[in-house]
Image: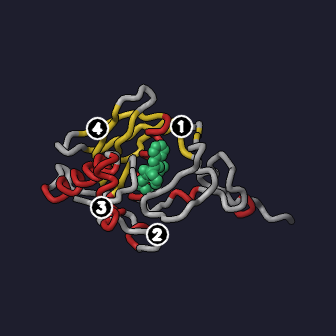
């Protein structure tokens, strides 16, 4: 069973690596790991188990957080209709997203971060995710609201990105994403004669 001791913290190099894709169909070892990540979320959300093992309740976890640099994530939370949504995915990928952005009013935290970090973490409002489940079956699904934010936080971990990387240094409460590419115009302009 995974506990907080299995979760690596800020400063550990694995959190900054780009994780490797898993085999598809997934091998037994990776399946076991992903199942243990899903169990961790379940345990952490059970008040009695969480108290007994001192677990911080989580709605998502990515394999790099348990020092396994492979592309695996687990998500467990309720949707806007208060229905349970549970996912364990190999090689998840955002295949499209809205132009519109959103953010968690209360800011974000992370099981790998033991300090309070204030500021707005802009996220896409709606995303379409592709990945493979524990049976190796392809999953393609759209998410919005809190679930979309959780998936973006987890997929960021697979790319070595921490939530605070997305807080604007000069304007921590800025609510929009920076442009994908800031083009250096002068480079393309003809010099003045
Ligand atoms: C676990 C994080 C993932 C979430 C952070 C923001 C979006 C995804 C996590 C630490 C504190 C507790 C918990 C949390 C929560 C938030 C709002 C509503 C209900 C994975 N992690 N938490 N962060 N819970 N519950 O680091 O679950 O935010 O990569
Ligand atoms: Ni996190």
Q: Residue at x 20, y 51 (%)?
A: 24
> Residue 127: where, in percent of width, then height?
46, 38
Q: Which of marks 2 and 1 is nearer the N terminus?
A: 2
Q: Which of marks 3 and 2 is nearer the N terminus?
A: 3
Is the CB of the residue bearing disc 1 within 8 angstroms of ligand 1?
A: no
Instruction: Single out the residue that lies furthest toward the top.
Output: 81
Is the CB of the residue bearing disc 2 within 8 angstroms of ligand 2?
A: no
Q: Residue at x 39, y 51 (%)?
A: 57
Placement of the N terminus among the 4 image quadrants: bottom left
Marks 2,1: beta carbons within 8 A: no
Q: Which of marks 2 and 4 is nearer the N terminus?
A: 2
> Residue 31: where, in percent of width, then height?
18, 53
Secondary structure state at the residue bearing disc 4: strand
Is the CB of the residue bearing disc 3 within 8 angstroms of ligand 1?
A: no
Secondary structure state at the residue bearing disc 2: loop
Query: Which residue is under mark 1?
Result: 125
Secondary structure state at the residue bearing disc 1: loop
Q: Nearer the viewer, mark 1 or mark 3?
A: 3
What is the CA distance from the residue labelled 3 to the residue labelled 2?
17 Å
Q: Quadrant of residue 167?
A: bottom right
Q: Which numbered tag is attached to residue 3?
A: 3
> Residue 67: where, in percent of width, then height?
32, 67
């Amino acid at each position: 069973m995974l506990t907080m001791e299995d979760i690596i913290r800020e400063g550990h190099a694995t959190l900054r690596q780009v994780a490797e894709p898993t085999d598809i169909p997934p091998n037994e070892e990776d399946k076991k790991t992903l199942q243990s990540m899903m169990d961790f979320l379940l345990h952490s959300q059970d008040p009695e188990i969480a108290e007994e093992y001192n677990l911080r309740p989580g709605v998502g976890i990515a394999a790099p957080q348990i020092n396994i640099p492979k592309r695996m994530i687990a998500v467990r939370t309720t949707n806007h209709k208060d229905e349970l949504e549970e996912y364990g995915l190999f090689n998840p990928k955002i295949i499209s997203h809205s132009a519109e952005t959103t953010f968690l009013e209360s800011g974000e935290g992370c099981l790998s971060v033991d300090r309070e970090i204030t500021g707005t973490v802009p996220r896409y409002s709606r995303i379409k995710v592709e990945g493979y489940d524990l049976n190796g079956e392809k999953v393609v699904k759209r998410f919005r609201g809190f679930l979309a934010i959780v998936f973006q936080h987890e997929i960021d971990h697979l790319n070595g990105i921490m939530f605070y990387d997305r807080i604007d240094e000069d304007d921590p409460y800025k609510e929009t994403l920076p442009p994908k590419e800031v083009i250096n115009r002068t480079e393309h302009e003809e010099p003045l004669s």
